[in-house]
Structures are given as structure tokens and as C-alpha cells.
Amino acid sequence: MDDITLTSSSAAQLSAERPELAAVIERWRIPVAYRKKPLDTLDRVLPDAWFEDRGIHRIDLTSYLESSLSPGAGTNGWINSGNGVDLNACVLNAPSPSRSIRIKGGRTKTGESENLDLEIVSGMVLAVVGPTGAGKSRFLADIECLAQGDTPSHRVVSLDGRVPDPAIRYAAERRPVALLSQTMNFVMDLPVSDFLAMHAECRGIANPTDTVRSVLEAANELAGEKFYSSTPLTCLSGGQSRALMIADTALLSESPIVLIDEIENAGVDRRLALDLFLGAGKIVVLSTHDPVLALLACTRLVIRGGGVREIYETGDAERECLIELEKYDSALKGIRNDLRQGRRLDPRSLESVL
């Protein structure tokens, strides 16, 4: 087949007729619903999420597919070495997931220079603390928009030591950052299972049924009140909605950077939420007033007056404090649960807290 025939064929057809290309095509992770469509039509029909995950613009898709299917196309295609096909080279020319972000300081609200040059790597949790109105949300917003000195704070954010491509900054569907805000409102009146299945399909997940089940199970572990696969999205409480999106972002989204605004207000299991993100290798940045969350982080920034004033690493002494704080937190959690279940309290139930 020549290139024209290749791109006018479907992924399913190519996999069947050209076994040596099967691994190439599998790495595209084309959703099942689109695998029988000609490759040269996919730029018009694939969902935005597919392009977001790969950092590819729609208008460039056909050329990427041609490149990856062409023998001898270098690192963008499959290479005939004379002894077969080098399947390790069968990748699209898309950016790899970000493994680090670097934040350079800007200015405080009074115009002072901010003494900040911080790198955060994959699997790390950064806590941002400070009084209400100090600028915590601005800090998260600077990371979300991959600021280049063009926000009120004048901070600069780089990915993997490089200036972010403007196409990634300004095209919402291609950003490597997921933001979980304090309020989550759904406008689609779908059952939870349909919403998750649609997302899994958009991501090209190989076993969507198992993934949907895993996300739902994780969300119910996070949430206080259980909900079901048949529950309409619009019937979820604020805490349930937040739990669902935390599980969805951790287990389905491929965004390598997760920003969380005051997760302690969500009514979810905070430690389990962090474990989900870290288990997925995410970079986590969270703003919080919660001392347990602040000490669970590797590093915390203290913001006042719109600027970072202190940077602390969580040391051994504070980890000892964390152990004690978690005991109190667990006891308070039990008391909150008793109240939710309609049980009465007596002074003896407070002994473990006081």
C-alpha cells in the first residue's frame, strides 16, 4: 500500500491487512467507535479529548498518521531495519507527559520582587498555605495558564525545563493541567456510568467497562454518601460530584499536573484522594487551610500579600506532629460520622480528641 491507500484505510482494516503495523496503530489508542473510519477523516470526527491527550492539532493529524506509517520515517514512523520493524519507533510526534514544572517568582501585591525559583516533579505534592485573600488561588491560576510573566503576579512557569508551546497554553483542549475547583456543577443530565463510559471512550481506554467500575468504586470510597452507576449527574451532591471528578481525574485523565483548591471543603477522604493522584504519577499542587494536608505535602509555600514568603520542606519533627494530628483528625471524623448517622454524643466520646 502507498501512503494514500494507508490513510484512506481504517485502523481496523490496516491492523487486519498489515500485521506489522498493528503495534503502531494500537499506540494511537483510537476509540472503538472510530476504528472503522478512514484515517483521513479522523481529524474531523475524533473527540477533543483525544487531541488533548496527544498535544496534536486537528489540522496536523493526517500528516502525523502518514509520518508514523511511512517506512524509514525516522522517530516519527516505523523503521525497516532489514530484520523487521522497529516497533519502539512507532510513536506520534506528540509531547511526552510533563514530569516537572518550574515556577519563577514575579511580584507581590505591593510590587516587591518575589524570591521564588521552585521545581516540582512527578509524584510530588506541593501545599500552598496562607490567609484568605493572600493569593493562593492566583498561584494555582498561574500554573493552570502556564503563565509567562503575563498575569498580575508576573510569574513564569516552564514544563520540563522548557517554555510551553503557545499552542498548548491557549488551546484549552491541549493543556497538561487539570483544575479541581471548590465547586463542581454538571450540566449534562446523564447517569454516572454513561458519563464515565463516554470519557473512557474518548480516551481510547482498552477496557472501558473495568475502568468505569474502578472510577465509580474509588469515587464512592472518597464520598461520604454512596451513589450508584445509575445516579444522574445532576442529582449528585457537591461532595459526591467532587469525589467523582477526583476519581475521574486520577484514573481516566492523562493530565500530568493536578491543581486542587481546598479539598478539605469537599467532604471527601483527603488522604485517599492524594493516594489516587500519586499512584497515577501526577504532580499535585493544592491550596489548603488544613494542617494535615499541609504536612502530608513534601513542600509547602506560605503566601502573604500576593507573594511567596517562605518555603518549607516537611521534616522529621513535623512528621511527628502529623502523626498526632492524624489521630485527632480520625477521632473528629468518627464524631462527624456519628452526628451524620443520627447518634447522640456524650462527653466520653470527646476524650480521644481533648
Image (tube, rainbow, N blue to C red):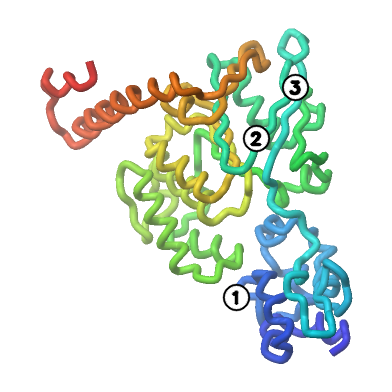
Tell me the SS state at disc 1.
Answer: helix
Amino acid type at circle 3 is Gly
Q: Residue at x 51, y 44 (%)?
A: 278
Residue density around tag 2, few if under 14, some if 14–19, many if 20 or more, within 10 Å? many
Q: Which mark is residue 105?
A: 3
Residue 87 appears in the rendering: yes
Label 2 vs label 1: CA separation?
A: 36 Å
Q: Is residue 15 left or right of residue 127?
A: right
Amino acid type at circle 2 is Ile
Choose the circle earlier in sequence order: 1 or 3.
Answer: 1
Q: Which mark is residue 120?
A: 2
Between 84 and 99, the residue placed more toward the observer is: 84
Front label number (2 vs 1) = 2
Tell me the SS state at disc 3.
Answer: loop
Q: Residue at x 46, y 30 (%)?
A: 296
Task: Tell me the quadrant of the picture where the N terminus can be found.
Answer: bottom right
Q: Toward which corner of the image does residue 25 lie, by quadrant?
A: bottom right
For residue 321, above or below residue 140: above
Instruction: List x then y, in percent, for residue 175.
Output: 71, 47
Choose the circle earlier in sequence order: 2 or 1.
Answer: 1
Task: Tell me the quadrant of the picture where the C terminus can be found.
Answer: top left
For residue 119, above or below residue 196: above
Between 326 and 185, the residue placed more toward the observer is: 326
Q: Which residue is mark 1?
A: 32
For residue 256, above or below residue 285: below
Tell me the SS state at disc 2.
Answer: strand
Instruction: List x then y, in percent, for residue 120.
Output: 65, 35
Label 1 vs label 3: CA separation?
A: 45 Å
Q: Is residue 60 left or right of residue 97?
A: right
